[in-house]
Amino acid sequence: MTMICHLYGLCLGALLQFPYYTTALSEMRDSDVPTAKLHNGIKIPLVGLGCASGVRENHIRTALSAGYRFLDTAQSYNWGYHEHEVGSAVHNHITNTNEQDIFIQTKIHPEDLGYEATRRAVNVSLKRLGLSSIDSVLIHKPRCWEGACNKEPEGTWRDSWRALQELYEAGVIRASIGICDVDDKLLDELLTQKIRPHIIQNWMDPLNQDTHMRKRCQSAGIQYQAYSSLGTQWVHHRGHKENPVLKNPILLNVANKYSVDVAQIVINWATRHGVSVLPASTNPGRQRDNLVDSFGFVLTAEDMQLIDALDGMVPRMPKTDPNEVKINFLNQADGLVETYWFSDAAGDTGEEVHVGSIEGGGALSLTTHNTHKFIFRDAASGISVGEHVVLRDDGKDQTHIVGGSGEL
C-alpha cells in the first residue's frame, strides 16, 4: 500500500536573536497543531510522536486517534524503536478512517553508514513499514562509537548522504532528508552538498537550548527538530536521577499559572520558537495533552523570557552512586528479544517496564542499580526466555548473555 503523506517545516530562533514563531496560537481550534514549511515548500506539524521509550503499536494507534500526524521512528530496535509496529498502526488507521495525511520519519542506524549500506537500509525500512516510499529519512548519528554499533560501517555519513540525495531525487524519499547531532563543522560541510538538509535533529530542552545551531538553521532555511525536548537526556545520559526540566521551579511556576503541566509549557515554548518536537508517551491522556492541550493558552513575552533565560543553567551533577552499574546485555539467540525492568525485584508482584529490544546478535547497554531485575521475552511469542538480577558486587561494568545455554 502506498501512503499519501505530507511533511512541513521551518526553523526559527530565540528571543532577541530571531523572532518568535508568529502563529496566532490563541486563535487555534482544538484540533489545530502549529505547522511550518521546509525549504522545499512542504508542510509539517511541529508536534509529533516519538516512537521509542516503550511506545508500541497500541500506543501509536491511540496517538493517531488523538490527531497525531507526524511519527518519528528509527531502525535501531535496541534503542527502543519498532518500525514494523509503526507501519502496522498506520495501515490500521488508514483502513479504518481513510485518512492518509500521516507523515512518517525514520532514521538510519550509524552501523549502516555507507552508500550501498544506506540504500539497503532504506529498503529494509520500507519493507518494515509496508510502504513503497517514505516521507523523511535522517542519518541517526554521523559516526559509530563503542557500544553503539555491532559492525564496522561500510562508509561515512558523506556516502550515506549521497545515497539519500539520490533516493530523494528519485521520489523514494518524498519530502525530507536530514541528520542528527550536528555541530558547526558538520553543518558547514552539509551546506556544501548538492541538497542541503531539510531537517536537523539535535538535543534541545529549556536547560540546553542549542541557540547557536538553531540560529544557523534559520539562516540556512533548515528545520530545527528537537529530541529529548522534555529533559529526558539528563536522566538517560547525564547521570541525573530526576528530570531537572520537569522539576525546574521556574517552569513549575509558569505551569501553575496556566493550570497545566511543565511538559505542556515546554512544548508551547519550543513551538513558539519554530522548533519541531517529538515527545514520546504511552499514556493516551498525556498524548492528547502534548498534542492539543499544549496550545490552549498563550505564553506571554515575560514567560518566554523567563524560559529563554534558563539556557545553560545546568543542574549540579549528582554525586557518584555507589550502587550504580553499567551493564551490557548481549543477545546470542537468533530472534528479537524484548527487555523489561521489573519494578519490584524484592517481591513477587510488580510492573514490567520496557527498556529496549535486542536483535539477534545485538546488544543493549544500560545504566542501572544494584538488585535491579530484568526479564527477557521472546518478541514473537511474549514468552519469558530468562531473567537477571544485577549485583553491584559483580563490578560497576558488567556483561550478561541473553540467549545462552539455559535461557533460550
Image: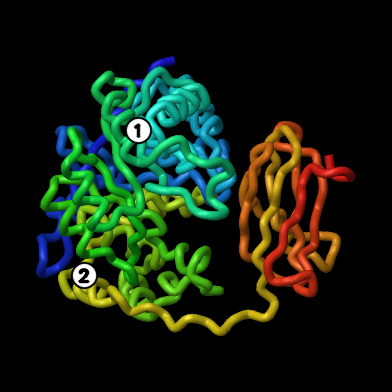
Whole-percent x, y for residue 313 in the image: 33, 79
In the image, 378: left or right of 247?
right
Is residue 309 in view? yes
Give how far apart the Cα atoms at labels 2 and 1 are: 29 Å
Q: Amino acid at mark 1?
A: Phe
Up-down: is 332 above or below 165?
below
Whole-percent x, y for residue 82 in the image: 55, 38
Residue, disc 2: 304
Q: Quadrant of the N terminus?
A: top left
Whole-percent x, y for residue 238 in the image: 48, 70
Q: Secondary structure at mark 1?
A: strand
Q: Secondary structure at mark 2?
A: helix
Q: For the point 31% across and 39% down, which residue is it?
A: 158
Whole-percent x, y for residue 131 in the image: 43, 21
Is residue 32 in view? no
Determine which of the numbered discs, if any, sits on residue 103 in the image. 1
Q: Nearer the viewer, mark 2 or mark 1?
A: 1
Return the residue nearer the eye: 405 or 281.
405
Return the residue nearer the eye: 190 or 75.
190
In the image, 154: left or right of 309?
right
In the image, 160: left or right of 81?
left
Q: Amino acid at mark 2?
A: Met
Q: Quadrant of the C terminus?
A: top right
In the image, 141: left or right of 7?
right
